[in-house]
Image: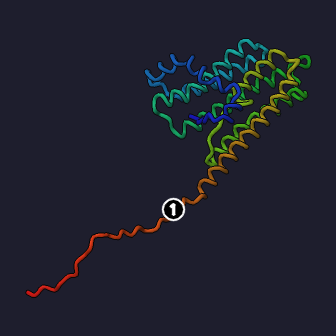
């Protein structure tokens, strides 16, 4: 559903999003089955959110192996909803809204599980006021900024940009690593915040350049070269006209 223009600059900042064509190719059998059975793209959006919720439960328990599996399913759902919509020719503006809400809900469920896991790292019970939990909250807030930047730019007429250097796929990887290595969680969360801020800045810079170039192109008048009219002089001698009496 979202557009992605593979300009050189955006290819450099795509991150793991550059693997999307390869990942999509692995999902081709599911895509073909969905098209053949007229399955709605919204089903895959909902499946992705559900997978993220299950992953959040496993993250809260520290079961990073199972969390990784369901985060892959979460990414598959986020990939298939747009792919099915395009393949079936049923893309619609509301589908874009459903897709974005699904992505943000999936992120919140994942970070919610990570916050519970972080709260369990300081002895028995849940220490919800620990610094690590606060870091998870800050990381969750920072993770929303790249999307806000892209949506704001798209609302102004720029291309909707996805990818990294720290996008949706990278967030899933960081979450799994923080679950698998809780001792490194503060460092990983700090890098997640930094990466989100850098991604936001890069997306805004790219959108500003695109909109500025478009404005210059719109304001540049189209000049038509002025040419002098050509006067053709015939060399054929003409005879004087005589009045003919009736």
Q: Nearer the viewer, residue 34 or 129?
A: 34
Q: Nearer the viewer, residue 35 or 136?
A: 35
> Quadrant where the C terminus lies?
bottom left
Task: Give residue 72's position: percent from left, percent from top.
Answer: 66, 18
Res 207 seen here = yes
> Quadrant where the N terminus lies?
top right
SS under mark 1: loop
- Residue name at image x 10 percent, y 87 percent: 245
Residue 80, located in which quarter of the rendered image? top right
Tell which residue pokes out farthest to the left in this image. 246
Task: Give residue 181's position: percent from left, percent from top.
Answer: 84, 16
Q: Residues within 10 Å of mark 1 (few under 14, many from 20)?
A: few
- Residue name at image x 20 percent, y 82 percent: 241
Q: Disc 1 designates what residue?
A: 225
Q: Is residue 30 above or below residue 97?
A: above
Task: Give residue 125's position: percent from left, percent from top.
Answer: 87, 19
Task: Give residue 128's position: percent from left, percent from top.
Answer: 86, 27
Q: How many marks?
A: 1
The coloring applied to the image is: rainbow
Q: Nearer the viewer, residue 192 or 20?
A: 20
Residue 162, located in which quarter of the rendered image? top right
Residue 160, located in which quarter of the rendered image? top right
- Residue name at image x 64 percent, y 49 percent: 156
Q: Is residue 241 left or right of residue 215?
A: left
Q: Nearer the viewer, residue 199 or 136?
A: 199
Q: Is residue 90 left or right of residue 122?
A: left
Q: Is residue 171 above or below residue 70?
A: below
- Residue name at image x 69 percent, y 37 percent: 147
Res 141 seen here = no
């Amino acid at each position: 559903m979202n557009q992605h223009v593979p300009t050189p600059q955006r290819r450099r900042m795509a991150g793991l999003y550059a693997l999307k064509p390869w990942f999509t190719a692995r999902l081709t059998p599911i895509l073909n089955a969905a098209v053949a059975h007229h399955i709605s793209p919204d089903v895959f959006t909902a499946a992705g959110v559900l997978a993220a919720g299950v992953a959040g439960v496993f993250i809260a328990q520290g079961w990073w192996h199972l969390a990784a599996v369901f985060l892959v399913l979460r990414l598959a759902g986020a990939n298939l909803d747009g792919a099915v919509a395009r393949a079936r020719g049923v893309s619609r503006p509301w589908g874009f809204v459903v897709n974005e809400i699904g992505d943000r809900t999936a992120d919140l469920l994942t970070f919610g599980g990570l916050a519970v896991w972080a709260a369990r790292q300081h002895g028995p019970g849940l220490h919800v006021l620990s610094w690590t939990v606060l870091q998870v909250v800050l990381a969750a807030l920072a993770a929303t900024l790249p999307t806000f930047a892209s949506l704001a730019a798209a609302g102004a007429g720029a291309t909707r940009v996805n990818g990294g250097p720290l996008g949706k796929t990278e967030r899933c990887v960081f979450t799994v690593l923080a679950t698998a290595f809780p001792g490194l969680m503060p460092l990983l969360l700090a890098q997640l915040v930094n990466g989100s801020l850098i991604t936001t800045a890069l997306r805004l810079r790219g959108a500003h350049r695109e909109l500025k170039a478009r404005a210059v192109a719109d304001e540049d008048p189209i000049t038509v070269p002025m040419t002098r009219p050509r006067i053709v002089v015939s060399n054929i001698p003409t005879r004087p006209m005589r009045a003919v009496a009736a």
